[in-house]
C-alpha cells in the first residue's frame, strides 16, 4: 500500500514534469501560510500539488504516519485546470492515488 502510494506520487511528479508544470523555484514563503483549501488564495493548482501535496504525502510515508483515506483532489484540479490541454494526463495518477487510498 505504502509502496503503491509512493509510486503514484512519483508518477504524478513525472507527469507534471512532462507537461512542463514542474517548477524549479518554490512560491514565496508567504504562499505557504494560506489557510484556504489547496492554498487557493496564494498558489496555482500545480504549485500546490508540487510544493504542498506531494511533500506532505512523502512526509507521511517516511514517518510511518497513517495515510489519509478520504482525499478528493481531482475535482479541484479538474475544475481549476479545465482549460489545460494535458488535464487528462495530469488527472490519471491523481485518480489512481485517490482510489488506492479510499480502498485501504
Image (cartoon, grey):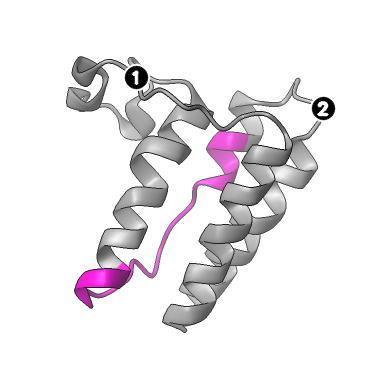
According to the picture, the residue beneath numbered tag 1 turns out to be 27
x 38%, y 22%: residue: 40
Total numbered labels placed on residues in the image: 2
> What residue is shown at x 78% (from left), y 34% (from top)?
86
Mark nearer the N terminus (2 vs 1)? 1
Q: What mark, if any, has residue 85 been given in the picture? A: 2
Percent from the top left, x then y, of residue 101? 47, 72
Relative image position of residue 42 (x, y in whole percent): 33, 16
Q: Name the residue at 58% across, 69% down.
A: 99
| On screen, residue 83 above or below 71 | above
Mark 2 closeness class: few <14, some 14–19, many ≥20 residues within 10 Å: few
84 w.r.t. 98: above or below: above
> Would you identify the image quadrant in which residue 34 lies?
top left
Q: Nearer the viewer, residue 35 or 6?
A: 6
Task: Tell whether position 76 is magenta.
Answer: yes
Question: Could you tell me which secondary element the residue under label 2 belongs to?
Answer: loop
- The magenta region covers 61-77
Amino acid at each position: 500500500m505504502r509502496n503503491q502510494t509512493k509510486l503514484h506520487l512519483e508518477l504524478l511528479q513525472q507527469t507534471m514534469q512532462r507537461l512542463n508544470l514542474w517548477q524549479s523555484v518554490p512560491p514565496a514563503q508567504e504562499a505557504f501560510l494560506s489557510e484556504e483549501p489547496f492554498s487557493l488564495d496564494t498558489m496555482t493548482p500545480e504549485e500546490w500539488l508540487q510544493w504542498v501535496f506531494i511533500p506532505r504525502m512523502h512526509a507521511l510515508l517516511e514517518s510511518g504516519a497513517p495515510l489519509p483515506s478520504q482525499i478528493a483532489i481531482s475535482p479541484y484540479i479538474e475544475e481549476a485546470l479545465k482549460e489545460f490541454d494535458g488535464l487528462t494526463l495530469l488527472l490519471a495518477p491523481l485518480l489512481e492515488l485517490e482510489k488506492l487510498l479510499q480502498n485501504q
